[in-house]
Amino acid sequence: MYDGKTVWITGASSGIGEALAKAFATAGASVILSARREDELRRVQAACEGDGHLVLPLDVTDYSAIPVAVEAARQHSGQIDLLINNAGISQRSLCVDTSMDVYRQLFEVDVLGQIALTQAVLPLMLEQGKGHIAVTSSVAGKIGVPYRSGYCAAKFAMVGFCDSLRAELADRGIRVSTILPGYIQTNIAIHALKGDGSTLGYTDSAIAGGMDADDCAAVILKGLKKGKPEIPVGKGFEMNALWIKRFFPGVVFRMTAKLARKKK
């Protein structure tokens, strides 16, 4: 399916990124694995089927490191067929209790880091005359929910970025896909930022009861192969909520407001 293709995945040390790395390796791709934790990347590399996978540690908020990483990726494989911007961090705090440093960190990781890497990879894809860029946004990039004001703002931003980029590249042979996960069984809640910048430290029932990460990766891979502009993925009511909001936005607002009241 992806034989001879090079797929670069950020946030590849755990969760959806790890599952995607394994799925693409099984599909025949040469996978470039990026995240901050090299030891975890090595673990994922060892679990990937096949050879030729590259561990390329990268902090997407270190803009000076991005051109160096792009050059290393180019030298390794000669081209980048698919870039999946999957690095990210979440939030669990009320707006009134959240420091600006937390908002800044959310945007640095979830927005600016993704844009910076995309911008650095684009010239190579334009030179190739083909390519595919994907960004992991979220259902929270379509529906604002309580305790995630910064996270939702960042994910909404990436939906808009992808829509704009897709239009810019429509005639250039480069596809752009926005991935919209709902509740997926990962550690995203454990590492989510509280208002003071500390991490939540535990998962919640919605995440724990969500879609398995490997099943999620299979849906994403299928959607990317088809070149879908948006790829919703999940198994819970949040998938229905995406459709309900299109036609009955007031209903979804009342539902999310009820969630906020329950947590008071």
Image: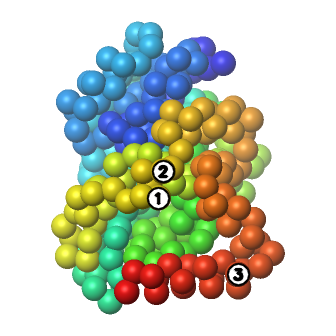
Residue designated by label 1: 206
Residue designated by label 2: 209
Residue 150, disc:
none
Please tell me whether residue 21 is drawn above or below residue 97 in the rendered image. Answer: above
In the image, farthest residue toward the right: 247
Q: Report x, y in % for residue 130.
A: 66, 33
Q: Report x, y in % for residue 227.
A: 72, 39
Give the Cα separation between the discs numbered 2 and 1: 5 Å
What amino acid type is highlighted by mark number 2? Gly
In the image, farthest residue toward the bottom: 96
78 left or right of 201? right
Give the Cα separation between the discs numbered 3 and 1: 20 Å
What amino acid type is highlighted by mark number 3? Val
Q: Residues within 10 Å of mark 1 (few under 14, many from 20)?
A: some
Helix, strand or loop at mark 3: helix
- Which of 252 and 62 lies nearest the eye of the viewer? 252
**Residue positioned 33% across, 77% down in the render:** 93
Helix, strand or loop at mark 1: helix
What amino acid type is highlighted by mark number 1? Ala
Report whether residue 10 is seen: no
**Residue positioned 60% across, 49% down in the render:** 234
Residue 34 figure quarter: top left
**Residue positioned 68% across, 66% down in the render:** 241
- Mark 2 or mark 3, earlier in chain: 2
Please tell me whether residue 216 is drawn above or below residue 24 in the rendered image. Answer: below
- Which of 203 and 165 lies nearest the eye of the viewer? 203
Residue designated by label 3: 251
Please tell me whether residue 44 is drawn above or below residue 137 in the rendered image. Answer: above
